Image: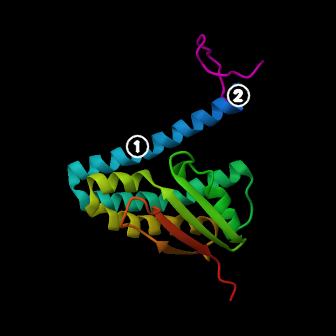
Amino acid sequence: MEELKDYSGEFRPNIRYEDFSKDVLARLLKAYCKELLLLDAYWQQEVENRLGSDAAFECTLANWTRIGKYEMKWAMEALNITGNDVAAYVKTCQMIASFAQDVFDYDFDLKSNNHAVLTVRHCPALVSLEKNAPEKIVPTCQVLEEEAMKAYTRAVNPAIQVRGLKVPPRKSRDEIACQWEFKIDQG
């Protein structure tokens, strides 16, 4: 059977992901990534509406520090990424749903297999916080993000150190969103 370019035709009761072209699957994956991020944002807002901002922050922090080991493990297995160095962490991060390509604008500078710098040029969460809730920038960017990244790195190797090189708030929206270093000390 020829790969499907879309699902605009008739209903197919036994359709599988494997029936679609690579381009369709990439578009679908990007849609799922957006869904995950929007679900998180809506969930946070609902908890805040019902229980307050402190409870919402605590629940969000708990969720992101718990899910990291699973998201990393599943992506590494799906992509056959092996090893436990910074390079393995970076390769996996390029593909995980919570750090979706085309949602975030970022790049990793892999300096060695045990050292990388992540530069995020555009972060939709930061843009939203700057506009709607600037008081949440410090707890989100300086606490939540760092703790979540540490949980994600621990899933690959507990020895990976995470350090914020440039973390919001930023002085101007022309600046990068943030910059982080990932390193395994060889000392």
Which residue corresponds to the image point at 48% horizontal and 60% vertical from the top-left? Answer: 66
Magenta part of the protein: which range? 1-17
Where in the figure is residue 45, as x and y percent of width and height?
29, 48
In the picture as drawn, the residue positioned furthest to the right comes out as 1
Which residue corresponds to the image point at 41% horizontal and 43% vertical from the top-left? Answer: 38
SS at mark 1 in the image: helix
Sequence order check: which comes first, mark 1 or mark 2?
2
Where in the figure is residue 167, as x and y percent of width and height?
43, 69
SS at mark 2 in the image: loop
The type of residue carrying mark 2 is Ser
In the picture as drawn, the residue positioned furthest to the bottom comes out as 187
Which residue corresponds to the image point at 46% horizontal and 72% vertical from the top-left? Answer: 166
Marking on residue 165? none
Where in the figure is residue 139, as x and y percent of width and height?
33, 67
- Give the distance between the C-alpha atoms of the residues marked 1 and 2, in whole angstroms: 27 Å
In the picture as drawn, the residue positioned furthest to the top comes out as 10
Residue 46 located within the stretch drawn in magenta: no
Q: Which residue is mark 1?
A: 39
Where in the figure is residue 62, as x and y percent of width and height?
40, 61
Most common SS among magenta residues: loop
Q: Is residue 116 left or right of residue 35?
A: right
Placement of 4 over or under 128, stated as above or below: above
